[in-house]
Amino acid sequence: MKSQTSRLASSASQTHRPLPSARTLSFVALSLWLASLALTGLVLYAKQQRMTGAEILAMGWLSPLMGNFAWFANPLFLWAFIRLQTRKSAVALTVLAILLSLDTFRLSNYLLDEGGGSTSVYAYGWGVVLWFAALCVLAAAVGTRQIETRIESGGVEGTDEWFRPIGFALCISMLMASGYLAIQDRRLANNVERERLSGLVFKRGPVCGATEPSVAQPLGRDSGPVEVRLSEGAYGGISYPLNKPTHLLKWGIPVVRVAGRDYSYAPAGDGQILTSVPASDTAAAILVVASSVVEGRHQIGAKLVEQATERVVFDQVWRAEAKGARYCPDYSTSPKEGEQPRKLITEALAVQSPPAEVQGQVARPPQPAENRVNAVIVSNTDALGLSEQSSPQPTKSAVPQSNVAGLRRSWMGNRSCPDNVGWDGWGSDSPVRLDTGWPFMVGDRAFYPGSRERYNALCAGDHAYLFFGVARDGKYYLTLEKRRLSDFHQVWSGLVVIQDQYLSTGDDVLKVDTVDEGADGLTIGLTKEQTGRTAVVKAPLRLTR
């Protein structure tokens, strides 16, 4: 009789044992956790980089440096899983893991490296959804284990058993919320944002629903220069590349006017060089570029007005998202053809793709290092027994007369140059702010051979020799190039290495006085202006390209 009663009790216990069991649920949770490692967890603004769960697991231990602790839910999850397999309670571990996991939604920046580089989080992938589902199912497994323990021991029902229905409810709610957000984001997003969300669940912040900029009625092609007016804030990097005339020219606009000068690319031998001349005729259109901060976020404004009719061709504003990581609508700082803002401007001005040498990098002339030679010192003031300390101080005659103060191009780097020829080192700060480098002036025409460390020139008839020097380890490296003044075409360039301890005491200490070209290269006359020391060197440079 007693044995029969025991069997009946055991049968009753088996009847009320919950299904699925805690063991089954724990392995389902582990399977979901492992699957989340193979799927996209986070998408970053930097290059739209997709981080899998495994990558996040490998790098996430650095997240406390960003003030986030969601990663620590992973070791707690695994610890709770192990305890469930040994039929022990894992309530506290599971609760703590779920609470830490919620810190995921506070993660706005992702640490890229141990050096502190970070980028903003753009969206969540299915890996995050499965990760949360694994935690919810684990909670259900913990509650199920409590029920099984009570049935086996014949105890009373405990509050921990509610983890089973709560875990299931959290899992269902989380899946429904993710589905709702995914649908809403795709309903509100514009085409570009919707394509970017392909394969993801939902965006971390509001989606961009602004329509892509377009032009109803463009200007006539080749109607004249486009004048760019920059607000004070637009000179900085925020409104890049609209604040750089070189970019607009590379997009196919023939002439860009900025601060009273017309910029364009002109032929220079087999390449192109940036030039500018004073503005003369009326501009065809005015492009107003503004940069401002509204409600703590940067925004870029661009407005194009037809000069003759005062018709507004377009008036577009791009607003920053996620600490300026991207703009709404899309705005690229290095736009390709068909990307904004290049697409909007080229459509408005009805310009076609420019030739390859203008659209991409301007044709690069031979570089000085490609024509490097060692110089032979023909004469040196050291041969007369002068030392660095006893060398005479320079006299006024050592400075070319064209450099005396008061003349138009009085920059000290210009030597033997006419008053209206040479580097314009005393002009406005526009070349620096427009990132063109200092101009070399030939009359009213400016040539921009690119930014360089130092600006020196020796004029000789229809040509100019541009030079600067760097001292390293007892050697003086003199970079020298010959330019034709009519179009600033580079005739040749080279690097002359001079080995002399008295001549190589600092950067740019030697000035070129004379350059004589011959069949065997150059004979260069040099002066060290700080001491008056002179030297003549021979350099077998290749003088043809």
Image (cartoon, rainbow, N blue to C red):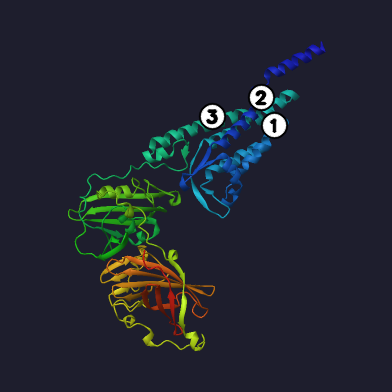
Give the label on residue 217, or none: none
421 sits left or right of 5 in the view: left
In the picture, the quarter occupied by the C terminus is bottom left
Q: Residue at x 40, y 52 (%)?
A: 295
* Amino acid carrying mark 3 in the image: Ile
Residue furthest right in the image: 2
Mark 1–mark 3 Cα distance, whole angstroms, equals: 23 Å
Secondary structure beneath label 2: loop
User: Which of pointers 1 and 3 indicates the residue nearer the eye?
Assistant: 1
Q: Which residue position holds label 1?
A: 84
Give the label on residue 21, or none: 2
Q: Position of residue 452 (x, y in %)?
A: 41, 67
Crowding around mark 2 (Cα neighbors within 10 Å: few <14, some 14 to 19, many 20+) is some
Question: Who is closer to the viewer here, 168 or 56?
Answer: 56
191 sits left or right of 92 in the view: left
Q: Residue at x 29, y 67 (%)?
A: 446
Question: Who is closer to the viewer here, 385 or 433?
Answer: 385
Q: Which residue position holds label 3?
A: 172
Crowding around mark 1 (Cα neighbors within 10 Å: few <14, some 14 to 19, many 20+) is many
In the picture, the quarter occupied by the N terminus is top right
Residue furthest front in the image: 519
Q: Residue at x 33, y 69 (%)?
A: 483
